[in-house]
Image: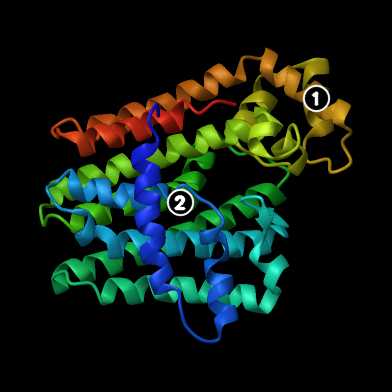
Amino acid sequence: MKNTKPIEKNAKVVNKYLKTKLKGNPKMLYDAAGHLIVNGGKRLRPYMVIKSCQILGGNASRAMPAASAVEMVHNFTLVHDDIMDNDEMRHGVPTVHKKFGMPVAILAGDVLFSKAYQIISESKLTSNATNQLISRLAKACVDVCEGQLFDIKMAEEKRIPTQSEYINMIGKKTAALFDVSCSMGAICATTKSKDISNLSAFGRNLGIAFQITDDLIGVMGDPKITKKPVGNDLREGKKSLPILMAIKSSKGNNKKKILKAFGNQKASKKDLKEAVEVIRELGIEENVRKQALKYAEKAEKSLAKYSGSPKKELVELLDFVVKRSL
């Protein structure tokens, strides 16, 4: 995305709204709930809610409660993800459970989850629109939980999953919130089911393209940009698309180099560097980018009948997501 100003401008407005909603006593609980929010994040999901509303003739103020609800649910998943993975840093700051302790972090996640539904239920939309928003967000939350467990099970099993199993997992774990962001934005503007399903499809395919690209960065990304060690996902044993493709297409000594680093917490920097070099030489980046592009093209087709600056901004976001540098 050549111009990220629309995203940055939107993030400021959303942040201001979120701060007004994350206040109360005990103060520590709300400080913990807002900790990741005040310390970074592009607010891509709220941006998608607002732009999906605007593409259908709605405005930002109508979509703001839904946009904030999605961001709260997203942050709820981050707090709980960090607990499950025992991660210590996110956005360059200590994770919520590291800063506030485990019990407060769990409660902070619960508050974010509950507040999301409270905000939607208090919005000034029709009762039919409100019911649809609540129903869709609830389904997306179920999908995220299912996707998370699929991911955990994949990591535990010795078997290498198929590409379709991987797509199904990220479709739930990541794309569900992208999908619901766009469909909720559409619901804030229209009752036409075709428009809602078009925006829903856009969000889902954007979400898959986003995660595929994210996984590529997780394996081959520049540590200066990712803030993670070289080949971090390889060492963690993540069964992401680039790693699945690399294991499947490598042979002999090359395969040995990849498997030596894969899921090996004690892998040396040299082992990881050699494995990443093999993956690079196999042309995995090009193949993974092609897969991401396939879903990006599907997403763009969903917006074919629309025009105007909100459409342009959504297409630019799609472009940014798929072409992010390593």
Q: Is residue 210 above or below residue 140?
A: above
Q: Earlier in the sequence, mark 1 or mark 2?
A: 2
Three-letter code, disc 1: Lys
Q: Residue 251: percent from the left, percent from the top?
A: 75, 17
**28 displayed left or right of 307:** right
Quadrant of the rendered image containing residue 320: top left
Q: Residue 139: percent from the left, percent from the top?
A: 36, 63
Q: Residue 9: percent from the left, percent from the top?
A: 36, 46
Three-letter code, disc 2: Lys
> Which residue is disc 1 drawn over?
273
Between 257 and 70, the one nearer to me in the picture: 70
Q: Residue 10: percent from the left, percent from the top?
A: 34, 49
What residue sits 19% from the left and 59% below the top? 188
| Circle 2: element type | helix
What residue sits 30% from the left and 31% below the top? 315
- Circle 1: is it few (<14), some (14-19), or many (20+) Cα within 10 Å? some
What residue sits 55% from the left and 86% below the top? 26
